Image: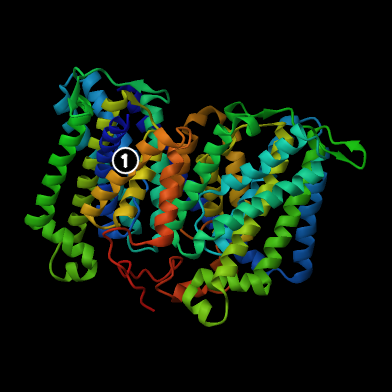
Amino acid sequence: MTNLMTVLRNLIFYSVILFVAIQVLARFFDFASKKLIKVGGGKKKLLIAGVGVFALVLPLLLAGEPYILRTSVMVLLYIVLALSLNIVLGQAGQLSLGHSAFYALGAYTMAILTVSFGVNFWIALVAGGVVAGIFGFVLGIPTLRLKGDYLAIVTVGFGEILRLILINWGTFTRGPAGIPGIPSPSFFGMAVKGNTGYYYIILVMVIVTIIISKRLEDSRLGRGLAAVKDDEIAAESMGVNPANMKILAFVLGAVIAGFAGGFFASFVHYVNPDNFTYMESVTILTMVVLGGLGSIPGVIVGAVILAILPEALRDISTYRYAIYGILLAMMMIIRPQGMISLDSLKRRSAADENPRSIWNFKSFRRSNGR
Amino acid sequence: MFMEHLSNGIALGSIYALTAIGYTMVYGIIRLINFAHGDLYMVGAFLTLTAITILNLPIAAAMLFGMAGAALFGIAIAKFAYSPVFKAPRISLFLSAIGVAIFLENFAMLVWGPETQSFPEVMTNKIYNFAGFRMSTIQIIIIVVTIVLVSVLSYIVKYTKMGKAMRCVSQDMDTARLMGINTNRVVYFTFALGSALGATAGALVGMYYKAVFPMMGFVPGLKAFISAVIGGIGSIPGAMIGGMLMGVSESLGAAYVSSGYRDAIAFVILIIVLLFKPTGILGKTMKEKV
């Protein structure tokens, strides 16, 4: 009973902090994005260049702090993962809860190819992306018939089945024991040893992912994805093929997550099925929701906050997922559009005028599901 | 051997059916897959266990305690996490439900500890033989409790005023409100009823496998949801049929196909059903208006 009282007291305390933090952050990001949106082209380029230079010199600044450098690598890794989920969830509007499966596929491809077959890191990395992409295509097929919450359940099932295969297929994946001793990559003959090398590899991956996301957003395909997200029937009648768009989103998200998985396997030199549970998918999902569905800067902010938070709050790590749960529900109630929403960056989304869209956050009209 | 797997499957199926009814009822009312329902099943099991070990209640009273406790949890969840987003898009409601599910799992981990707790021996377990159909006491209890609860539920839904209101709300919430039905009360009542059924299922599983742990609701919750989809979501008899089919096919599949993949069978069935008959066995087709 005393245990129950302590837990309840702590949870209420954390909920209040969370509530205040969301409100404060929301005000801050609203203010900041309003300021930034007015900043002209030249200054914007300067700002981006500043952030880039900072990211480039960070390992030099952190030379004596291996722990912080390691955390920075994980933060960048989660940015890649969150952006890859964002392509599926934020840009194409398909609710996927099995994202850790693609991550796992990339990681296991890397582990098996490098450890059992002695393949080069870079080839294994690409192979991981390809394998994840093939499975993304396979998972994309049921999405043609499924929507919203049904799709979410199927993706949960996909993730669980994959985890069961990893556990049960002992001869290939070494079962629950996992695969140790994944080698470090080498770059033109130089072995990448310390965290600094990994930092630069993942930094390149982050930049590439951001460019892909950004280019996708402005391209014909990206517009198609947005159309499918806002209203599938309308999109189809305007000549957009929703089937192609959805599968494309799944494949693209899966490939990027596969690359991230391959990197992760090499970075920690060890994979086992417990690294890729449903909770991992939920963590990535929470990052995307916290930052703002579909908004690239938002997703980056969400990933940074939620990747640093557990490190900063080591003392209450047992409360971590309970807090994530409260955070998800609370975000939906007080700020469903996320920290940096699309709406505050550009004009109102077309989903706001469509009462049928499951993404319609503005006009709170209920049609009782029919 | 086959008959033994079949009776195991029927017992398991009863549990899935009880849980699936909770999903189907909530879905019928607010069109939400209550992702937290499987975790209410776990909360029910833990509350029953606590009532037995700490409060020293007899098993029947402990199960009633678990049901009442889970019903309160269900109402609280509907009140604090779902009702603020009722009118929001369904995606918000669903994400909020995922949040609640994660919260409940970890709440149980914090309060009762992450390790598996053993359920005390509450009755002598005998094996009965009905012409080759072997059943243990606990399996018979599971089946009897399921039949009794489902009969009570059917009575409530068919013949009481609240049941009539529930059917109205599931047809059209706005019109029901116009007709003077207190829809909020109906929603909370539905959550309480569904959660109580789920909690009973959890307590029965605790007794059956003699183990209670915080993640015990996750996979059975998904399977129960899949049962509800197989039967046709929104239909209570459909949930019964779906649950039985799921229990039997899982039990036989684990015995004759592969025991390591017993949890995968459910998802394979789900994908097949959704691809070929997405409305389920007893479901009504819903046309999307443009």
Query: Is residue B114 something one can see in this rendering?
Result: yes
- Viewer-proximal residue, B84 or B200? B200
Q: Is residue A322 left or right of residue B24?
A: right
Residue sitting at x 17%, y 71% = B178
Residue sitting at x 32%, y 58% = B280
Chain ID for label 1? B
Please provide percent x and percent y for residue A98. 53, 48
Please provide percent x and percent y for residue A288. 56, 53
Residue sitting at x 61%, y 47% = A102
Q: Is residue A4 left or right of residue A213?
A: left
Identify which amino acid the numbered label 1 is placed on.
Val
Please provide percent x and percent y for residue A149. 42, 57
Residue sitting at x 29%, y 42% = B16
- Find disc 1 in the rendering and name its residue: B248
- Compared with A186, A97 (above or below) is below
Which quadrant of the rendered structure holds the N terminus of chain A?
Answer: top left
Label 1's element? helix
Crowd around label 1: few <14 · some 14–19 · many ≥20 (10 Å): many
Query: Is residue A297 something one can see in this rendering?
Result: no
Please provide percent x and percent y for residue B183. 19, 60
- Compared with A22, B283 (above or below) is below
- Viewer-proximal residue, A106 or A83? A106
Residue A66 picture quarter = top right
- Viewer-proximal residue, B232 or A292? B232
Q: Residue furthest bottom?
A: A238
